[in-house]
Amino acid sequence: MANKVYTKKGDDGTTSLLSGRRVSKTIQEIKAVGSLDELNSFVGLLRSEILDINGLFEIIQWNLFNAGSMIINDNNIELTEVTQEDIKSLEEAMDTMNKELPELKNFILPKGSRSVATAHICRTIARRTEIEVLECKVLDNFIKLHPISMYLNRLSDYFFVLARYIAHKEEVKETIWKN
């Protein structure tokens, strides 16, 4: 007999932290974890669209799961954390892609092929998620939010550069925003 996915424990509007303590699904930490999950799903979609350059998409997905665990870690369990090295790897990937891109002097519209558009969706979800992580207050005595918010900030930049890079490789013309 297969394990059931549903437990019915959340039917009352609560969910568990890592310690097992039940909290409302409406607290900011749970909202932030939900956005991390949404971003992770869209990264998975992007992975289905384009080649995973140097395995970075998989690392990003692991880091997003790790960030979620860090946010709900209410009893200081030792976890794999998002680190400065993870942030540096995003910066290095952007630097490599930027070498092939024309200089950007204007805002561009988020459009293009499906993979370009998906990268832009990842960018915008990363921006929203960063803000949601910064709004976490209840558990901040137990977690290290700063590396997560820094990572998400850099991740939104990464997806912007990636969208431009994909468009460049696919020869999709960027549309300059006209104000």
Image (spheres, rainbow, N blue to C red):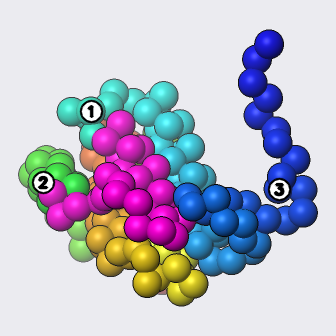
Asked if residue 143 lies left or right of residue 101, the reply is: right
Q: Earlier in the sequence, mark 1 or mark 3?
A: 3
For the point 23% across and 61% down, the residue is: 83
10 Å neighbourhood of mark 2: few (<14), some, or many (≥20)? few
Residue 88 visible in rendering = yes
Amino acid at pointer 2: Glu
For the point 76% across and 17% down, the residue is: 2
- Residue that label 1 marks: 55
Question: In this orientation, which residue lies closer to the viewer: 36 or 100?
Answer: 36
- Residue that label 2 marks: 92
Residue 9 x/y as whole percent: 83, 52
Question: In this orientation, which residue lies closer to the viewer: 45 or 78?
Answer: 78
The tag on residue 10 is 3
Amino acid at pointer 3: Gly
Asked if residue 97 lies left or right of residue 58, the reply is: left
Foreground: disc 1 or disc 3: 3
10 Å neighbourhood of mark 3: few (<14), some, or many (≥20)? some
SS at circle 3: helix
Residue 142 x/y as whole percent: 43, 77
Amino acid at pointer 1: Gly
Q: Which residues are magenta?
A: 58-85
